[in-house]
Image (cartoon, rainbow, N blue to C red):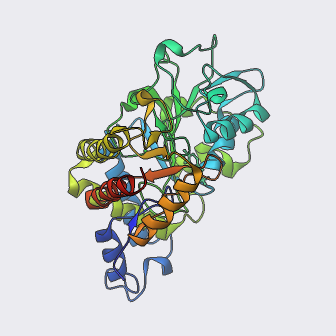
Amino acid sequence: MDRVHNFSAGPATLPLEVLKKAKSEFTEYQEMGRSVMEISHRSAEYTEIDHQAKSRLRDLLNLGTDFEIMFLQGGASSQFMMVPFNFLRDDQTADYIDTGRWSKKAIREAKIFGNVHRPFSSRESGYDSVPTDDELNLSEDPAYVHYTSNNTVAGTQFADEPETNGVPLVCDASSDFLAKPIDVSKYGLIYAGAQKNVGPAGVTIVIVRKDFLEQAITEDVPTILQYQTHAEKIFNTPPTYNVYMVNLVLEWIEEQGGLSYFEKFNKEKATLVYDEIDADDFYRGAVDKDSRSLMNATFRLPTEQLEQKFLGEAAEHNLLALKGHRSVGGIRASMYNACPRESVETLIQFMRDFRKNNG
Ligand code: PMP
């Protein structure tokens, strides 16, 4: 069977070239008579993989030497806890912009450690928007401002970093990491689970600015949960095969033309889908137009029965994983970097035909 058109929100489709390269090296890496999975994380070969991946991230994101990069485990969900454990003292307040299911989970964890202020929340309206800078009501002296750059479930995305007047941004970038260039100077810390845009599930990329890291709490934080521990060296066994896969994806991103290439490519794909949604009132975008995500396009059909029919017939056309998140329903087309234009074009044609037959 050929590969399907995979619109999974995550773990998501990976570049076929990367999978093929991994396949060719699966049982033997660099004439070692062993695979990457079977060598020490202290070996010269693995150290080289770790260095390559970090140096590619530095180049792609324009990170100076003032940033540390680490490959951790526990998913973005562990970062919800690790960020406040390291940076929120119990007499301090952190600002958390509340734009979706994942922001809400991050807020719940932060409250264990200190005070949380929400400078904006779209919760009452079903998380259908992200704020403009004018809508942000920041607290007096927050330890940091946390935001979710792309809201995977609702299908909203910040077009630019929120303005914090110099307060370090902490960003959950899980679902748009490396999908476009960003202004790294605004960030104290960026974290992203790999499984949407950069590799298989199992590794979380964390980037921390050194002067922000210097403010981290160290007393009463278990060693493995301190960022400083991981900044200094590879502390314990990392998910070595996942880092190897991430390195292959980063190489592929470079070969395609880097982050500006993907910014344009992702905009083109999303525009195709949103134009189709807006063509008439059969399909209905699920969120405010100004807040629409280029990664996850969410939309509704006139009835839930038609949505079920849409999903069933889409699957017959090899268009898979289009079902909206279980908490919101509807349709969600996730189109990260590795989603080919051809998959989006096939989806558009299917949407047109479905509307013609059911509208
Ligand atoms: N943040 C965002 C924006 C996500 O999309 C997800 C996963 N869907 C998470 C956090 C949670 O990630 P994990 O399952 O890796 O903990």
- Find residue 337 and report its horizontal and vertical position in percent: 34, 53
Image label count: 0
Image vertical order of residue 319 relative to residue 344, above or below: below
- Find residue 202 and report its horizontal and vertical position in percent: 55, 62
> Taking the image as drawn, is residue 47 in sight?
no
- Find residue 40 and report its horizontal and vertical position in percent: 50, 74
In the rendered view of the protein, which quadrant contains the N terminus? bottom left
- Find residue 313 and report its horizontal and vertical position in percent: 45, 66
Residue at 56%, 45% in the rendered image: 153
Q: Quick one: which residue is furthest to the bottom in this view?
A: 33
Residue at 42%, 39% in the rendered image: 293
Residue at 38%, 89% in the rendered image: 33
Image vertical order of residue 192 relative to residue 312, above or below: above
Horizontal side of 310 relative to 343 (left or right) equals right
Image vertical order of residue 224 relative to residue 135, above or below: below
Q: Out of 123 and 281, give the one closest to the viewer.
A: 281
| Residue 249 occupies quadrant | bottom left
Image vertical order of residue 265 relative to residue 89, above or below: below
| Residue 247 occupies quadrant | bottom left
> Taking the image as drawn, is residue 357 in sight?
yes
Residue at 68%, 41% in the rendered image: 105
